[in-house]
Image: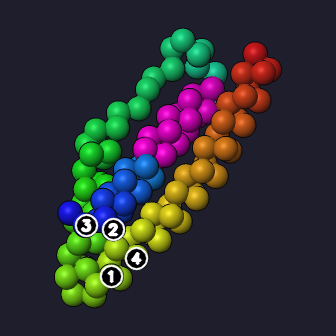
């Protein structure tokens, strides 16, 4: 495994971990809007998305690098950067919504 490959895998795992956080906030905010009490809210199942999707993206980057080196790694990293920004926005929005709703209760 090259350094760039290891860095890409770390980046993908980080971005997909942000997805886990974003999903958790989204479900909590949605249920808070519906009036579900805090102690009765459900959680989020991250399996099989968390371990599989980053590995699939990493494998796709490696496959693309075989033909278009280094553009597979770059393309997957950039796409996940954009995805990470969108997830960050979602986290901030849903966290703010949750604080607002729980502040009223």
**Quadrant holding the C terminus:** top right
- Farthest top residue? 39
- Residue 56 numbered mark, or none: none
Question: Can the viewer see residue 57?
Answer: no
Q: Residue at x 72, y 28 (%)?
A: 99
Q: Which numbered disc, 1 or 3, marks the residue that appears first in the sequence?
A: 3
Q: CA distance from mark 1 to mark 4?
A: 9 Å
Q: Position of residue 18 (x, y in %)?
A: 48, 46
Residue marked by disc 3: 2
Task: Give the camera-side residue of 50 and 4.
Answer: 4
Up-down relation of residue 8 to residue 89 (above or below): below
Q: CA distance from mark 2 to mark 4?
A: 13 Å
Q: Position of residue 72 (x, y in %)?
A: 32, 78
Which quarter of the figure has residue 61? Answer: bottom left
Callout 2 touching callout 1 (CB < 8 Å): yes
- As helix, strand or loop, the secondary structure at mark 3 comes to loop
Q: Position of residue 58 (x, y in %)?
A: 27, 63
Which residues are the magenta region?
Answer: 17-32
Q: Main secondary structure of the magenta part?
A: helix
Residue marked by disc 4: 75
Residue marked by disc 1: 70
Residue 24 covered by magenta stretch: yes
Left or right: 42 in relation to 49? right
């Amino acid at each position: 495994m090259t350094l760039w490959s290891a860095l890409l895998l770390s980046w993908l795992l980080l971005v997909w971990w942000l997805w886990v956080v974003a999903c958790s906030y989204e479900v909590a905010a949605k249920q808070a809007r519906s009036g579900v009490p805090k102690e009765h809210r459900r959680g989020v199942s991250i399996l099989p998305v968390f371990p599989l999707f980053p590995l699939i993206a990493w494998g796709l980057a490696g496959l693309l690098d075989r033909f278009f080196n280094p553009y597979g790694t770059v393309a997957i990293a950039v796409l996940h950067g954009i995805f990470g920004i969108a997830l960050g926005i979602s986290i901030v929005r849903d966290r703010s919504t949750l604080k607002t709703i729980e502040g009223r209760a």
